[in-house]
Amino acid sequence: SVTGCSRFSSISQSLILSPLEILAQLRCRLGIYVLLLQCIHYAFVFQTPTLNCNLDISRNQHDCICTTDQIVVIGETVCPSQTPEKKHTELSRGRKRKPDTQSESSQGKSIVRGPKISDYFDFHGGNGSSPVRGLPSVIRSPQNSHSHSIRQNSSSPTSLSFGEHVMHPKQLAIKCVQTDLTGLKLAALEMNKNLDLEKKEGRIDDLLRANCDLRRQIDEQQKLLEKYKERLNKCITMSKKLLIEKSTQEKQACREKSMQDRLRLGHFTTVRHGASFTEQWTDGFAFQNLVKQQEWINQQREDIEKQRKLLAKRKPPLSSNSQAPTTNSEPKQRKTKAVNGAENDPFLKPSLPQLLTQAEYHEQEEIYKLRLGHLKKEEAEIQVELERLERVRNLHIRELKRINNEDSSQFKDHPTLNERYLLLHLLGRGGFSEVYKAFDLIEQRYAAVKIHQLNKNWREEKKENYHKHACREYRIHKQLDHPRIVTLYDYFSLDTDTFCTVLEYCEGNDLDFYLKQHKLMSEKEARSIVMQIVNALRYLNEIKPPIIHYDLKPGNILLVDGTACGEIKITDFGLSKIMDDDSYGADGMDLTSQGAGTYWYLPPECFVVGKEPPKISNKVDVWSVGVIFFQCLYGRKPFGHNQSQQDILQENTILNATEVQFPVKPVASNEAKAFIRRCLAYRKEDRFDVHQLGRDSYLLPHMRRSNSSGNLQMGAGGSGPAASSIISY
């Protein structure tokens, strides 16, 4: 058994070596080991019973069979392609095999059958089987490319169990895999892999080249972008330069015109009253000339009136007695001269005016009438010119104040705010804000920049309240998007005490300025403006949550083109009220800012003083619409026209405004008056709301005649064509 183990170990060690070394060792050992390996390989092909080995082999593989009686040797190789039937015939024929070296030297070239293979494996405790059968198939047949599983518990008489000689602590487990790959298939696979690799490498090269091209294009685009940026910066710089030059020229022209108008229209002079100084207006030579002309006309009128009185004394008597007074007058005059003495007597009575004939009197009377008519015409022309000069003077005064405010502003030198908005010139100034016309360098459009400046002497609490109020106005205004409402573009801060809001710019002035210049407008123009205002109010009450403007007045209605026949836009939402679910109930919402607003345009419920704050709704804006419409038609406010806000508050003017009174002139339609009455209803329960006002027949494209005219037609004789006539505006 020791000898068998040593042989088994030597054979296993030799099988691990390369095939040439294995052949050399086997030939040295009489060529038996080569034949043994070939027999084992041949046994695998024909599936003979195998050795009983302690191996874990897959059941899906073919079993290996090895018997020494079924081996056919041809030289030193084994033919695996022969069928089992052919092998049995060859064994029966007794094929020759190559003799070993010792038989060739002793017997020459004679063929002698050698001993059986089992004779070389006679161990002391064995049965003549080869010890290599106990080895795994991978070690026993390294030349075979196909792996086979080994059956256990073989019944072959030549099988030998090497259970005694296998080391139990370290058992060997091998999984064999069968494959159909051949050399051609491997070559084809390798070729395909090489082709795929070449394709991938080519694809990689193409992608690298494309990547390089893209990088080159990106670099070119970056350079082009930098070039365009540089060009854009140059364009912006040039635009700023041109805009500043244009603004500077306009400012200079405005100041030159203002200086010329100072002499023609007037100027402010500082007058001292005790320890204080006040500004007093002094009219220019244009007004002085008109005043002189009016004085001359008045003097001429007085002279003509005196001459007419003298003419009346010389008026001839009736035609029947026209000659009698003349004949009797001469003796009376002579008698008077004789009685009174000399002609040079200073105490003589003046002679009576000589009477004129009827023709002379009428001729002179007609001359005086014509002169008076001409003076009246000249006076009317002077009055028209005076009104025109007053309008021009209002513009001149407004421009003087604007120039004075602009010169005292810290933003007068065309700064660029937020690296975007170039300030051009001042539009107006309020209590704590300035409005500048600006140019948006990014969007390339004009805008109105409202600069809010807090007083540095204010307490922090007051500053915080003002800032909260401005932020609230910004939040309300930012969400609005309607063609009849000024658009809010932007909001930003400059420092802790200064912040800005950017609004849509309108070329024209507001409605208040227009009314000051033209006093009033036609009903069609006023109706068009009211329609646009109501359209904007309907939008404010359709959004969620609804909004009450609360400060509708002509000053907050901008005329886009500066004329009454164009579009309008509503602005200034500083006093707006949000009608959210928490604060708005069935009877309205509490007025927490009582006393704010413009009193001429607020309804009576805003002036009610009590334990609880008054309730308001969108009917506040409806009242304001009625006041604006009345002012556009008649050139005056319906309530408190010549009163100040303090007088209105003290005299309870609006609280006593129970009914509106319409002037006789100018003439307005009954439909317009009825519409104003619906807007200015004293009780808010009787007043229209915004939605009802939007559906009013007066604002529709076609409007029926008033109920009064309709009732007259019905009372006159039923529903004829006149009763259903339609007025189209």
Image: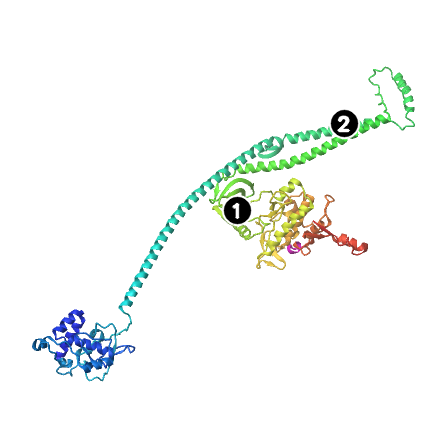
* Circle nearer the N terminus (2, 1): 2
* Residue picked out by circle 1: 502
Which residue is farthest left? 106
Task: Please state the extent of the stretch shown in magenta in the rendering.
Answer: 688-693
Q: Is residue 577 shown above or below 36?
A: above
Amino acid on which disc 1 is placed:
Val
Task: List x then y, in percent, for residue 705.
Answer: 74, 52
Name the element at disc 2: helix
On the question of residue 640 being in view, the answer is: no
Name the element at disc 1: strand
Q: Quadrant of the N terminus?
A: bottom left
On the question of residue 404 being in view, the answer is: yes
Residue 99, image quadrant: bottom left
* Residue picked out by circle 2: 303
Q: Residues within 10 Å of mark 2 (few under 14, many from 20)?
A: few
Q: Is residue 276 shown above or below 224?
A: above
Residue shown at 47% from the left, 39% from the top: 238
Q: Residues within 10 Å of mark 1 (few under 14, many from 20)?
A: many
Q: Which label was assigned to residue 21?
A: none
Number of numbered discs visible in the structure rendering: 2
Amino acid on which disc 2 is placed:
Asp
Marks 2 and 1, how far apart in space? 63 Å
Of the two numbered discs 2 and 1 in the rendering, the one whose residue sits closer to the viewer: 1
